[in-house]
Image: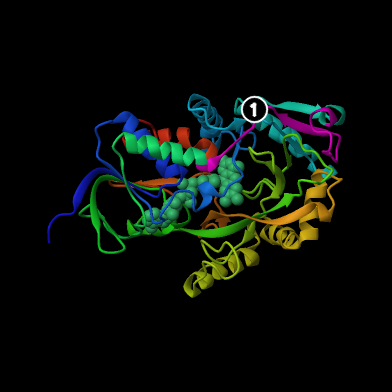
């Protein structure tokens, strides 16, 4: 059997993380032979093309976490990138409001975190909130304001990065699912029988990252559980004008930010995303993306989480179940914007899946980004939000660490 074609680097997955890693590699080594392998026939079919499009400023993340390390810098790099290439970006700002009186102490906690992370944040009272976002409500009379939070067009950014990579000689192989690996020979195999050799391999396969990592004996204590993020659209004729983004003070025990208002570049407003466990890694709607073995695997872990109730899992599920109906969703929106009525929301096809890593030893959802390496392979195992925002600085850290130029994660 002849040797498969060899590349200096192979990146698995052409989401924002894979593309940003490829961009970082080619910046450092313009002559490197680089192949990106993507199972879909186009970009943005999964999380990177289905997100809220918010460049987070870095308020939420505890000091010392990877998210804290890369979010603020990543947001700036991504915003500069949009400015440099004239890609749509709007600095709409964001308010974070306590929706219950008892959430008020979290306002101080987030304020301290934001300051520790070097994020521009303002602690505001009800009067200032009304000036910034007249329709928003705070349960305690206080809120946070992040003027730097911006919105972008995720798909436009993905396509722009890809085109730059192509122009720099990076090869893309679409409709090519990596299905197996021979780590001793440094070869990956794809569906259809093609194989490729690598000097170093980066696994950035999002919802499948745990599966690919295990082919290399990496991340054996982890498994990915999908959470579905659905949205409702605010009817264009609704008599409620939301200027920027309105978020609740989140439950900091879980890695989700709670139902919030989102605006896109065209000016449409959505409420979402929910965070309901899904039964397949691509279970976007109906029975789509389901297979029996995955349903059994995911159900098994979900039942375990319910049984041990770590991180208040039962409460999360109770709250999410209440949002499965339109009226439940509207009620979550009313916590932020009291004048929203059920009839102002319409169903829409905007939906994404957040693949969330579960540590099966600790029985906990992993809160931070997680990257593990073995030999000449690096695996991005928990590229959850704000991985879109952070992608450029995260990729810098991933590549620096894997090439021995940084201390690690
Ligand atoms: C509803 C929702 C809202 C969000 N909102 C925000 C936000 O506002 N701001 C923010 O910063 N982040 C947000 N996020 C998070 C952000 O979108 C993700 O963290 C980020 O897109 C992850 O990027 P990725 O490249 O790891 O994954 P993906 O975009 O899923 O890319 C992985 C790629 O790997 C490919 N792949 C998988 N398996 C294989 C295989 N075996 N072989 C080859 N290719 C494979 C997939 O087809 C896919 O294209 C949100 C996410 C969701 C779901």
Residue 92, how many percent across, how many down? 68, 31
| Number of other residues with Cα within 10 Å of mark 1, as a class: few under 14, some 14 to 19, many 20 or more | many
The magenta segment is 130-155
Identify the residue position indicated by label 1 in the image.
Answer: 148
Residue with the most extreme left position: 1
**Tag count:** 1
Residue occupying image coordinates x 82% and y 33%: 142
Residue occupying image coordinates x 81% and y 51%: 344
Residue 273, how many percent across, how many down? 66, 51
Is there any visible trace of residue 239 in the rendered image?
A: yes
Please state if 368 lies on the left or on the right of 127 as rendered.
left
Please state if 356 lies on the left or on the right of 257 as rendered.
left
Residue with the most extreme bottom position: 292
Whether residue 136 is in magenta: the answer is yes
Residue occupying image coordinates x 85% and y 31%: 130
Please state if 75 lies on the left or on the right of 209 as rendered.
right
Whether residue 280 is in magenta: the answer is no
The one nearer the camera, 29 or 40, is: 40
Is there any visible trace of residue 219 in the rendered image?
A: no
Residue 261, how many percent across, how many down? 72, 44
Task: Give the color scheme: rainbow, by chain, secondary structure or one colour.
Answer: rainbow
Residue with the most extreme front position: 237
Q: Is residue 295 above or below residue 55?
A: below
Quadrant location of the N terminus? bottom left
- Location of residue 123 by image quarter: top right
């Amino acid at each position: 059997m002849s040797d498969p074609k060899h590349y200096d680097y192979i990146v698995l997955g052409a989401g924002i993380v894979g593309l940003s890693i490829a961009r970082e590699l080619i910046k450092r080594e313009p002559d490197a032979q680089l192949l990106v392998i993507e199972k879909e026939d186009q970009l943005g079919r999964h999380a990177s093309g289905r997100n809220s499009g918010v460049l987070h400023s870095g308020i939420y993340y505890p000091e010392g976490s990877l998210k804290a390390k890369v979010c603020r810098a990543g947001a700036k790099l991504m915003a500069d990138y949009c400015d440099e290439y004239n890609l749509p970006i709007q600095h709409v700002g964001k308010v974070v409001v306590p929706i219950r009186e008892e959430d008020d102490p979290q306002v101080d906690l987030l304020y301290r975190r934001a300051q520790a992370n070097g994020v521009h944040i303002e602690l505001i009272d009800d009067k200032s909130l009304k000036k910034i976002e007249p329709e928003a409500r705070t349960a305690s009379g206080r809120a946070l304001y992040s003027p730097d939070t911006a919105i972008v067009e995720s798909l436009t950014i993905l396509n722009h990065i890809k085109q730059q990579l192509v122009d720099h000689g990076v090869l893309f192989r679409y409709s090519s699912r990596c299905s197996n690996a021979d780590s001793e020979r440094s070869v990956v195999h794809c569906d259809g029988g093609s194989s490729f050799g690598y000097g170093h391999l980066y696994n950035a396969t999002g919802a499948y990252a745990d599966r690919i990592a295990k082919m290399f004996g990496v991340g054996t204590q982890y498994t990915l559980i999908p959470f579905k993020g659905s949205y409702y659209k605010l009817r264009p004729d609704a008599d409620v004008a939301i200027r920027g983004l309105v978020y609740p003070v989140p439950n900091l025990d879980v890695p989700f930010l709670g139902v919030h208002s989102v605006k896109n570049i065209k000016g449409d407003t959505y409420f979402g995303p929910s965070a309901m466990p899904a039964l397949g890694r691509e279970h976007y709607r109906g029975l789509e993306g389901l297979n029996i073995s995955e349903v059994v695997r995911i159900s098994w872990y979900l039942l375990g989480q319910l049984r041990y109730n770590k991180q208040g899992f039962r409460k999360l599920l109770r709250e999410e179940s209440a949002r499965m109906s339109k009226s439940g969703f509207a009620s979550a929106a009313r916590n932020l914007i009291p004048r929203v009525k059920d009839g102002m929301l319409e169903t829409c096809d905007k939906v994404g899946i957040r693949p969330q890593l579960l540590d099966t030893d600790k029985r906990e959802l992993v809160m931070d980004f997680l990257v593990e390496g073995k030999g000449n392979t690096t695996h991005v195992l928990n590229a959850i939000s704000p991985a879109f925002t952070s992608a450029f600085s995260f990729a810098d850290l991933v590549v620096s660490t894997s090439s021995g130029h940084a201390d690690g994660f």
